[in-house]
């Protein structure tokens, strides 16, 4: 069919894209097709946690490219076993299911919970999720997501999800009455506006789940893999969830997702109940093993020190700009709530050769690589202050 639209592209129109073509990246720098240099504090939306093209991951991928790319899950995959062993030894979970994205990891968690409830009681599962949450774009994860704009137009959606208010104490009473199969949440809501869960609220929620045998699912697709200062954010809340989902930073930009579960629930899955052609293929697993090896406890200590410095500097900057209402976040998942719309700041930043994001309507989201240096942070701050001046009247 001939193209009659002025801005026609052969790509479906699912994203409002900025008019910038990026063709190369290294660390926190990316280059446009016309050779311009940009400072990237988006990390591919919390995915390139080690910066662009990190050398240890590149080396692991290059080695794997020479031996085996893909063979399917019908055979034993030593790289997959190795990765699963690393993930379970560095978390409270017993078994892993591999897939390719965050939505798929959550979809797998939802299927596992449904099968678990069905086996136990022959009833349909009820899953509590929260307002402003984001869990993905497949039909079940859209149903789980607590944002109307994500759901509109796709009804009827899969049933069984009940959305309650995040961080509210009345919610806990409601959960006791509903007695759901599972509760699923982001401990720090990313897309919804960089909103951390209250530690006391989470402790109480975890206690209720334990007492009432409710499965506790943490969606760590955005918060995991060192983004928030520990390998997984649940560690900082002093809880032990039953299920965790990962993707984004797991492969440093190479697509891979994972759903981890405690043995009592993981054992529900039997051959034929779930699967994925690409899930956990040797290339993806090599990237993830190299990524996890890099994110050692010492690496996390250093990253934490730098993120504290960054947050303090952002606090100082915010005092000079009344448009900034609050600086919040954990580790390198940082949000600046602004008066008005956040998008003009993102657009102004682009003019200053700075890549930043928005979250919700009025939050600037800043996601540098988690190994960024203080020097690069200073560089960012200098340019970001110019952006804030440009937007003073917004
Ligand atoms: C918390 C959370 N869960 C799930 C997803 C979906 O991940 P994916 O886009 O890889 O399907 C995202 C993506 O932003 C996310 O932030």
Image (cartoon, grey):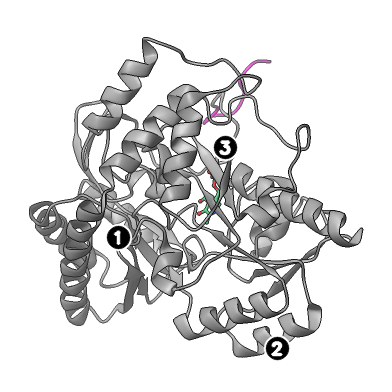
Camera-nearest label, 2 or 3: 3
Return the residue at label 1. 332
Residue lying farthest left?
A: 375
Return the residue at label 3. 98
- Residue 6 part of the magenta segment: yes
Coordinates of residue 371 in the picture (x, y in percent):
21, 49
The numbered mark at residue 173 is: 2
Q: Badge 3, how many Cα within 10 Å: few under 14, some, many 20+?
A: many
User: Dot 2 lies on which element?
Assistant: helix
Res. 33 in view? no
- Name the residue at 45% across, 46% down: 87
**The N terminus sits in image quarter:** top right
Camera-nearest label, 1 or 3: 3
Of 86 and 390, the residue lying toward us: 86
Q: Find the magenta span and give its range.
A: 1-8
**The C terminus sits in image quarter:** bottom left
Res. 139 in view? yes
Marks 2 and 3, the one that precedes in the sequence: 3
Q: Main secondary structure of the magenta part?
A: loop
Marks 1 and 2 sit apart, C-alpha to C-alpha, by: 33 Å
Of 60 and 353, the residue lying toward us: 60
Q: Is residue 330 above or below residue 109?
A: below
Q: Is residue 119 above or below residue 11?
A: below
Marks 2 and 3 sit apart, C-alpha to C-alpha, by: 35 Å
């Amino acid at each position: 069919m001939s193209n009659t639209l002025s801005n026609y592209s052969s790509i479906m129109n699912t994203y409002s894209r900025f008019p910038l073509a990026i063709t190369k990246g290294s660390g926190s720098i990316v280059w446009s097709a016309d050779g311009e240099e940009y400072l990237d504090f988006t990390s591919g939306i919390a995915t390139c946690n080690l910066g662009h093209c990190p050398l240890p991951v590149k080396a692991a991928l290059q080695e794997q490219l020479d031996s085996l790319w893909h063979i399917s899950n019908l055979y034993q995959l030593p790289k997959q076993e190795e990765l699963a062993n690393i993930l379970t030894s560095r978390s409270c979970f017993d078994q892993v299911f591999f897939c390719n994205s965050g939505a798929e990891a959550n979809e797998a968690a939802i299927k596992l919970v449904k099968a678990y409830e069905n086996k136990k009681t022959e009833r349909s599962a009820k899953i509590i999720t929260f307002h402003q949450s984001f869990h993905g774009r497949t039909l079940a994860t859209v149903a789980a997501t607590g944002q109307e704009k994500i759901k509109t137009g796709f009804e009827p959606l899969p049933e069984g999800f009940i959305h309650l208010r995040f961080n509210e104490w009345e919610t806990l009473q409601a959960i006791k009455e509903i007695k759901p199969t599972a509760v699923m949440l982001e401990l720090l809501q990313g897309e919804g506006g960089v909103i951390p869960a209250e530690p006391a609220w989470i402790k109480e929620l975890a206690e209720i789940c334990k007492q009432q045998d409710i499965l506790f699912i943490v969606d760590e697709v955005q918060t995991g893999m060192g983004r928030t200062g520990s390998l997984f954010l649940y560690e900082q809340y002093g809880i032990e969830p039953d299920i965790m989902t990962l993707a984004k930073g797991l492969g440093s930009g190479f697509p891979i997702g994972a759903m981890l579960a405690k043995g009592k629930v993981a054992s529900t899955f039997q051959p034929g109940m779930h699967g994925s052609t690409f899930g956990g293929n040797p290339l993806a697993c090599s990237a993830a093993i190299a990524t996890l090896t890099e994110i050692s406890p010492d690496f996390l200590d250093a990253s934490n020190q730098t993120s504290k410095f960054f947050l303090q500097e952002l606090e100082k900057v915010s005092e000079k700009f009344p448009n900034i209402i609050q600086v919040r976040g954990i580790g390198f998942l940082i949000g600046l709530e602004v008066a008005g719309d956040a998008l003009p700041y993102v657009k102004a930043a682009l003019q200053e050769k700075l890549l930043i994001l928005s979250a919700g309507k009025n939050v600037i989201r800043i996601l540098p690589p988690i190994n960024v240096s203080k020097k690069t942070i200073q560089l960012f701050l200098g340019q970001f202050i110019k952006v804030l001046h440009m937007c003073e009247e917004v």
